[in-house]
Every structure is written in structure tokens, then in C-alpha cells.
Amino acid sequence: MPNVSGLEQFIKGLYDDGSAYYHEEPFEDATGIEKNSRNYDELESRIHDVFPVFDPRYLGYEFPSYTFIETENHLAEASEESTTISLLSEKAQLLGTVLGDVDLIHRRIDENRWTNAEFAKWAKQRLEVFEQFETYPIFEIDRWYGKDINEPLHNSFNGNMGPVDGDPIRSLTDDEEAVIEALFEDPGLLKLTSDYTRLDITIPNSIADLDQSGIEEIISRLKAEDILLGSSITYEINRTPWQCAFMGLSLGAENGEVDHDGVIEALQDPDFDEDEEEYWDEFIMPFITSGVGQGWADILIELRIQDLSDLDDIAQKIRDIEDVESTKTYLMTDTLLNEYTRR
């Protein structure tokens, strides 16, 4: 992989705000790169897509999950695109080989637990490389594609036990649905509510019946209610300095009363010294979720690390958080798929 000047700021800047990609001044502010610069074509080639980030449950996907897969003697076969990636549905978001007691980790999102169960049934019958696998259902999302959710929703159901506590997922209006579709068509529309006041923004035909102030109002409302979380990019991880890792946190307390929310808050806003902040932010830790595994992961986080020593430092800091009893980590050695779920 050729080393390209400015790659880290380029990827991180657009991961934080993908809508900047469409507008010259915000683009240069976010990335430090001019689009006519010598390295621009090579930098751009490492981006897959720009997209708006929504809490997926408002888009009709109530069952995000991870699948931990054992391939036994079929790891080489599982790493081939023809046997895995091309057979997975469009709901696949991440897939890669890992080190540990499983061989593959797969993040996906389904409409509900029944459609996820149908996927599991299909995978067992059709994917010979899936010798054994466990699904880790996500019941609470606290960070999604690097965007924090201020007041996380719980799922409208928890898989087996019926409704759980938490605010319900409200229905979207027809105009909100139209604006959401337009944002997937052109995430640059998000800049209508930015501090950049002189941007040339073309309103898509699909929402031409709404005036600009009405569109701005809808976008602002979706943001305020943590339905629209921001915008981001998917990028080719294997052509960057970063590797993907997964860390499961088991919680426990001597009195049995675990402060789950306190652990989440510490993960989102850690109390670190200045020299430690460089490897701990919304890019380094882009996903924070809670679910149910086989007794070892009350909270599951994803990490993007440049050096294995960073992973050691982060793991130690996480174990220092009150009520974190232990951690379990998988390092992704090859990223086979890194996408987002379309509307």
C-alpha cells in the first residue's frame, strides 16, 4: 500500500462529516486537502461511499447484530469473495477474518429478529464455511458510524421477552421520508443547516415541492431527535494504516448493581490525559453497542487502531472503568467487506 501524504486527516475528516465531500470550502476544512492537489485521486480511491447516518431503527431496521463464525478447516475458502461476500444479502455491513476462538466476524442489520433468524437458517444451509456461528443481538446503540446518540433508544422488542423499557420509535411523516430519501441521494444537503452560508446547493427533484426553509426545518428536527446523526463515509480499511478490532466488555460489581450507563458515558467521553487522547475518539471507537452474547459481552465496541500497542493501552484504560470486570478482544486480520445499509 503506497503511503499517501494527508491520508489520516482525509479519512478521519470525511468519516466525521461526509457531507463536506460535496462542497469545496467544507471539504478543505475537514480534510486539509484541495481537490486539485497532487494526491487527491489516490486519496479519493480509498473511499467507497458517502452517506447520511441515521439511527437504523427509524429506517425500519430494528435488529442490528454481530455474527461470530467458526469455519473450522474452511478459513481459506471463507476468505474468498465467491463463497462469502457475493452470497451475503445487502444487509451486510462488515465482514472479516479475525484472530481468536472464531474465524470471521460479521456485522449486519435486519428488519427484525425473524428476518435475522431467516438469514441464520439460510446461512446454515447454503454457506458451507459457516460451520458454527453465534448471533450477538444489539439491543441498544450508543454510537453508530462514529456518531453518538444522546438518548439511546432500546429496541421495540428484545428478541425473546417482548417489549422492553425505553422510548418508542416514532413514525416518520411523508415529508421526513422524502427528505431522508433525498439525503441518501445527495448527503451534501446536510450543509443547509451548517455554518457555511454561501454554498451552492441544488435541491433534488424528489423534494422540489418543499421550499428550502422547510427542508432545513425537517433536517434540523431529525438531528434534534437523534434520528439523523450526521454523515460519514465507508472506506477501504485494507488500504489505510488502521486495523479493525472488536472488544467485548463484561460488567460486574461486588454489590450486584452495575452502572451500565456510567460505563457507556465513560466510553463516549473518557477522562484521559492530553497525551492519551490521540488514540481514543469517535473514529478510533466508531461503534458502541449493547447486547447479549454467551455471557461475556454486556457491551461490544469496535476499534480502529494503527498499532497493536494502542490496543493494549485502550484495553487497560477500559478495564480501569468502574464496573468493567473483564474484556475480550478479537483483531481483524483481513477486512473482506466494509459497507453501509442503504435506505
Image (cartoon, helix red, strand yellow):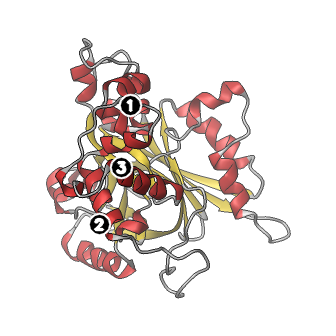
Residue position marked by numbered label 3 in the rendering: 52
Position of residue 225 measured from the top left corner of the image (x, y, whole percent): 52, 60
Percent across and percent down for residue 327 are 63, 53
Residue 266 as seen in the image, left or right of residue 116: right
- Front residue of 89/247: it is 89
Q: Nearer the viewer, mark 2 or mark 3?
A: 3
Q: Which residue does the image show at 49% across and 79% down from the upper left?
A: 156
Position of residue 112 in the picture relative to residue 303 (left or right): left
Camera sees residue 333: no
Q: Please tell me which of labels 1 and 2 falls first in the chain.
A: 1
The answer to whether residue 32 of the structure is visible from this angle is: yes
Kindly identify which residue carries mark 2: 130
Going from N to C along the chain, the mark reached first, 1 or 3, is 1
Query: According to the image, label 1 marks what residue?
Result: 11
Secondary structure at numbered mark 1: helix
Q: Residue 167 appears at what percent x and percent y?
A: 57, 74
Residue beneath the point at 50% across and 81% down: 157
| Residue 288 found in image quarter | bottom right
Which residue type does callout 1 highlight? Ile
- Looking at the image, the residue that sits furthest to the left is 82
Corner quadrant of residue 209: bottom left
Q: How many marks?
A: 3
Amino acid type at mark 2: Phe
Q: Are marks 2 and 3 in contact (CB under 8 Å)?
A: no
- Contact, CB < 8 Å: mark 1 with mark 3? no
x, y percent for residue 320: 75, 46
Residue at point 62%, 79% (across, down): 165
The span from disc 1 to disc 3 (Cα, nearest Å) is 16 Å
Q: Secondary structure at mark 3?
A: strand
Task: Report, in whole angstroms, how far the alpha carbon at label 1 lies from the one at label 2.
Answer: 33 Å
- The reply, left or right, for residue 133 in relation to residue 313 is left
Taking depth in this image into account, of 49 and 130 the one nearest to the observer is 49
